[in-house]
Amino acid sequence: MRAILLVFLSACAASTALAGDVVDYQVAGQTFEGYVAKAEAKSKGLVVILHDWDGLTAYEEKRADMLAALGYDAFAVDLYGKGNRPVETAAKKAETAKLYQDRATMRARIFAGLKMARASGTQPVVVIGYCFGGAAALELARSNEVDHVNGIVSFHGGLGTPKGQSYSAKTPPLLIAHGGGDVAVTMKDVAKLADELESAKVPYEIDVYSGAPHAFTVFGSKRYQKVADEKSWDQLKLFLDEKF
């Protein structure tokens, strides 16, 4: 049974079961609601998850539980605020627009989520993100506030670099999982990102899955593509093995 916990440490100590727990935390006076799943045995490492445009939902919770089953501690960050889980497309666009237009707030919420995930210590972490969360993960990559971040992964995320931003020698290794059939984020966007990363000498890998559309990992959706999802998950597992 899930329980709402006010202190992350309490959530960590409460259970070693793979099913995780909701945890409340504060950012700039606002309450946010994350999700923590702990490995049964000694953790191999900490994975932080950044959510899609509909907020932290059962999808990210499932991914966190899957990572816990693999032996990792996982924390899904809330970038919108407690109770803010938009359902209609217009509302989802509005929420992402707020953060795309206010990158300082986006970064502050990502940093706060990282801090919450590391409440028990400053251990190394790999950050992964889905769709909007993939774009947010790359925002973190460009921030240079990446001490103890061993790697960053984007699944079918936005790849554009905002004006005035760039990657640098401090950017941790990147893994980009992209659908070849994605019409929202095109192969031209992929090529442009590769050029940027080459120029900045950032270690990266870009995996393109033939015919896979945008959001190809979302279970139960019309866009879900089993082969691309499973292959990209296998690549994530290899990446985690390398970075921890």
Image (cartoon, rainbow, N blue to C red):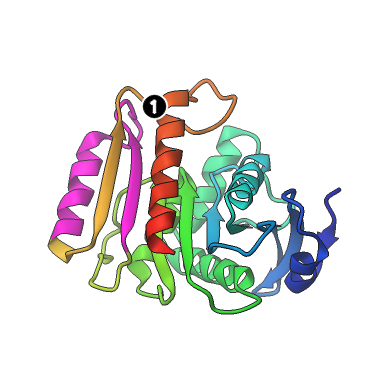
Looking at the rendered structure, the kind of residue marked 1 is Pro
Q: Element type at marker 1?
A: loop
Q: Is residue 57 left or right of residue 209?
A: right
Examine the structure image and report whether residue 178 is included in the region drawn in magenta. Answer: yes
**Pointer 1: residues within 10 angstroms few (<14), some, or many (20+)?**
many
Residue indicated by mark 1: 213
In the rendered image, which quarter is residue 144 located in? bottom left
Q: Residue at x 62, y 40 (%)?
A: 59
Observer-nearest of 172 and 85 = 172
**Residue 62 x %, y %:** 64, 42
Residue 114 relative to residue 32: left or right: left
| Residue 232 covered by magenta stretch | no
In which image quadrant can residue 109 be found?
bottom right
What residue span does the magenta drawing correspond to?
173-198
Q: Position of residue 120 (x, y in %)?
A: 65, 77
61 or 68, which lies in front? 68
Q: Depth check: 5 or 100 in front?
A: 5
- Locate residue 177: give its quadrant: top left
Q: Going 22% across and 63% down the picture, which residue do you hit?
A: 202
Does 16 appear above or below 189?
below
